[in-house]
Amino acid sequence: MFQFSPLDPKTVFLLYFWGNLFICILIFSYSFSYATIENRKKLKAFGYGKILLTIGWVLIFLRNVAPDFLSVNLANSIILSGCCYETIAIMSMIKTKTRRHYPLQIGITIAAIVVFNVATLLGSLMNTRILIMSLSIFAIYLPPTIGYFKKKGNTFFRMFYLLCYAVFEILIFMRAVYSYLNPQPYFFSRGTFDSLYSISLFLLTLIGTVGFLLLVKEKQDLKIQKLLNDKNLFFSIIAHDLKGPLGSSVSLSEILAQEIEECSREEIREITGMLHESNKNIYKLLENLLEWSRVQTGMIEYNPRKVLLNQLIEENIALNKNAALNKNIDLRFDWTEIIEVELDKDMIDTVLRNLLTNAIKFTDQQGEIRVTIERIRQKAAVSISDNGIGIPENIQQKLFKINEKVIQKGTENEIGNGLGLLLCSEFVKKHQGEIWAESEPGKGSTFKFILPLERIKR
């Protein structure tokens, strides 16, 4: 008949040590071999957590050999820090917004380290220290477990991962209750419960790591699929929009080639004017296509530096002054303070240029365009307002979206397809900012974007 033999302390240590070491190798190997730059940061955070856990277990095993400060205080502090690193990596896989919970994780970890070290300095019993550590680890892993539980649209891998950490939390809590009900004088015990607990925790650690890697790969695959879909849609939009001006160019050039002898000077001037306008539209579309493809393939690097935003806006207003004068539009820049922002000058140049061009395009003769900036806490807000024709509600909902086609002609039948706004959205997002539009048909539009004053670490 099968009889379970409790594990000795050395075996328990070897399980945790080799398990965490194997996981470190697995995580960093995958990070350097297959992961994208974005996922590599998450994998590294998870890997750093496992490295800290490995170091912590090495120090714990040196108990009664090394000083208590190393084998007790420092060892458990390192283990709690490793748990914090791991949970931050776990939370980063849910949503970007979960970053606001990172201070909570760090706060819980710091509080747990302080409580444990104070209890140790006050000479608390071994059982009390085990209870504090169990409850601390439970508290550190609770927010990400709840986050995954509340997440809507869970996939198979996310549910699998949630199940692993839910069981992990239950085991940790059971350990705390068991320690409270069954005080023990030693950290390592040969009891049946401790052995089963250690084996279960070891298996869950391995399974959870595999689940994390699968979750990273799933997210990476979904992002790649979305990029492919966006690329196909973008090319279909470009192809459709090129067809019109290219067809016009072909027709007009054909007229010139076949009937130039019979055309008057005025007719030739009119045809060449239309041909020039058509070619300008083709050039603009191709320019947008090139810019978009460079963004999507990572060829445009984000190179922020300190720039006076007032000066950058004035430069772009100067570039658009003639276009505004041609329509007798009053183009003004109102500001009350000089604001310095850490930004990529080329990207924000493109944003301002596109927004000003659009404002002129959709503003009538004798119209007004106002550009304003203001400081809102640690951010700079830029507004470009016009009193033009405005944007219909059905078009407003499609702005800044690749999967929606936007067609609206300017006040003098200028062609617009919304591709410039897609680039604006991409570039503002690169700066961890926001962009949106407010408009009322017949009363004008206001495009606003907000940028952090300082570069946000990625």
Image: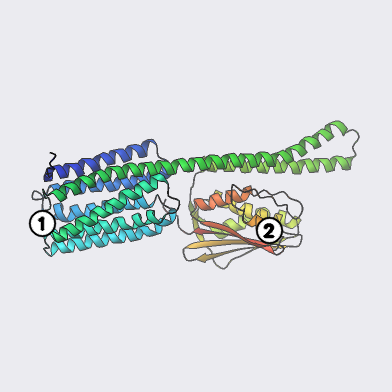
Q: Residue at x 83, y 34 (%)?
A: 256
Residue 453 at x, y = what percent? 48, 59
In the picture, residue 333 is in which quadrant?
bottom right
Q: Residue at x 31, y 45 (%)?
A: 208
Specify the quadrant that holds the N terminus. top left
Residue 110, relative to residue 256: is it above or below?
Answer: below
For numbered disc 1, what is the local secondary structure? loop
Farthest residue in the top direction? Answer: 258
Camera-side mark, 1 or 2? 1
The amino acid type, in three-letter code, at marker 2 is Pro
Of residues 121 and 427, the one drawn nearer to the viewer in this rendering: 121
Q: What colour scheme has been applied to the protein in the rendered image?
A: rainbow
Left or right of residue 429: residue 273 = right
Of residues 441 and 142, the one drawn nearer to the viewer in this rendering: 142
Q: Which mark is on residue 184?
A: 1
Residue 323 at x, y = what percent? 72, 54
Left or right of residue 78: residue 301 = right
